[in-house]
Amino acid sequence: MPALMPAISFQNVTKTYAGGSVKALDDVTFDIQPGEFFGLLGPNGAGKTTLISILAGLTRASGGRVAVHGHDVVDDYAAARRSLGIVPQELVFDPFFSVREALRIQSGYFGVHRNDDWIDELLAHLGLADKAEANMRQLSGGMKRRVLVAQALVHKPPVIVLDEPTAGVDVELRQTLWQFVARLNKQGHTVLLTTHYLEEAEALCGRIAMLKLGRVVALDRTSALLAGTASTMLRFKTDDALPPAVQAAARVTGRIVQVKAHDAAEVESLLAALRQAGVRVEDLEIGRADLEDVFLEIMQGDAPQVAA
Amino acid sequence: MIGVLSGARTLLYKEVLRFWKVSFQTVAAPVLTAMLYLLIFGHVLEDHVKVYDDVGYTSFLVPGLVMMSVLQNAFANSSSSLIQSKITGNLVFLLVAPLSHWAWFVAYVGASMVRGLVVGSGVLAVTLWFAPLRLVEPGWIVVFAFLGAGMLGSLGLVAGLWAEKFDQMAGFQNFVIMPMTFLSGVFYSVHTLPAFWQALSHLNPFFYMIDGFRRGFFGVSDVSPWTSLAVVGTSSVGVAALALNLLRIGYKIRH
């Protein structure tokens, strides 16, 4: 059986700035298969947005090849872009037009005209039906974000790219958006997501790539990434100073302390150290490591974890 | 071929709709400005300046003002649209679309021509109250109006791609477009200038646009309309080629 044509293919993608002295992307290679919900994670400056900009044609790679459904994004840009719907990270809009006009215009750029039925469906699904005739300037930030999503989907692209779409948006929009995108994914659309909210990536993405300083440092199924790390986390709250040994191993966020523990004996010794130091512990729980733990472990380490 | 032509058509429609939605500023205001020029200069100079024997100064002024309005508004349309989209970031909607550099060119320049010609027609219509209209060789009016609007629409595209902030765009407009427009014989015949300024005027393509355009109204001009056509035609092709090439390489818009 012949291999499926990847929905998105990054092959040895490199991007350098300042005459080659700054490497934003360094030999990035991976494929995303049709129908996948794929997460692209990494800290600020890791190269996520640069990679997506190259995919969208906003930036040109210094080396390598990027293709969408087999169409090279430079040599066959028109076919590649027709297959892509990009939700940009920045909250941008054209202040001259209403929501419906903006959607009709965006659709027309792709050669798709008279598709008001689909536009109405998009507006309804994204909670924008009563804003269709409103000028873009009159919308709140969350509403503008919804319009950006609608604009990306207005020409019915098979591949949807969301570049941190939930940054700074309220819980209700986040839920609406994910329900909608998850449904599109079930219908066969490929989704590539970058996000800072790791719980979103864990809940939604079947496979994840992690970028660090322009290089792929992890690429695997989400479940495999979670299974491959220290499996237990000790979490508690305290107002007291931690003993030095615990402090060195802990991740502290305000009153919340999280410490990695490989087995029950390690949990016991940690608790003993806390008791001995007189630390008053509240809301103690022992849980499975989540994607945030995996992310931090990988970002702090040197060795790439890339599945074959 | 789906998308190539219809995409350009949509962008042309969007660009026309953009200026039409603020037509008070983009159409009515320049018509009013041109009318004020005509009232003031015509009133002050009517009895003092005689350029052609059988043409009053106010009548002489009309074609120059019409062409000046065409040129300035054609330039303003593409340049302001592009710089606004670049600075506000909404150019991304176009950059992710499957539009060729030809589609961008046709749409931006086409919309600029529409605005330039609409404003020029408005100025002409308003000035009918102040000076009798003569159309001795109307073909030249159409030729130079279209060529001038097209060339300035292309130049606006170049400026819009080049400028990274509004200050640079204002500089281009005030230090390049305005002097070239005002020193092109809108308000006078270059034959009345000293030899040096006359020679300098002949290096300005805007002079040929206005001289050729005026020829269509009065049947007389400072230079042959064919010479003007050659200069304006060559300049237009040159600027269009530059604009197309900048679009093709994604100058300052694709990094």
Image (cartoon, coloured by chain):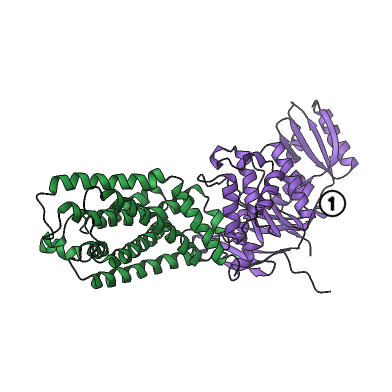
Chain colours: A purple, B green
The spot of residue A215 in percent (x, y) is 66, 59
- Viewport quadrant of the N terminus of chain B: bottom right
Comparing B196 with B116, the one in front is B116
Label 1: how many Cα within 10 Å (few below 14, some 14–19, many 20+): some
- Whether B100 is drawn above or below A281: the answer is below
- Determine whether the residue tagged by mark 1 lies in a helix, strand or loop: helix
Q: In this view, does B245 lie to the left or right of B63?
A: right
- The chain holding disc 1 is A
Is residue A169 positioned above or below A192 on the image? above
Residue occupying the far right of the picture: A264
Q: How many marks?
A: 1
Residue on which disc 1 sits: A227
Q: Using the rendered image of the protein, determine whether residue A189 is visible from the camera's viewpoint.
A: yes
- Left or right, A89 with respect to A30, comes to left
Q: Residue A26: which quarter of the image?
A: bottom right
Q: In this view, does A4 lie to the left or right of B78?
A: right
Q: Nearer the viewer, residue A49 or B27?
A: B27
Please identify the quarter of the rendering in which residue B95 is found. Answer: bottom right
Q: Can residue A21 be seen in this view?
A: no
Residue B93 place in picture, x, y as percent: 56, 54
Spot occupied by residue B64 in the image (x, y as percentages of width and height): 24, 56
Q: Residue at x 23, y 61 (%)?
A: B217
- At label 1, the amino acid type is Ala
Name the residue located 66 percent from the left edge and 46 percent from the top edge: A165
Instruction: Determine whether, in the image, residue B1 is placed left or right of residue A246.
Output: left
Which residue is pictured at 73% across the width and 49% down the height?
A181
Residue B2 at x, y = what percent? 61, 67
The quadrant holding residue A5 is bottom right
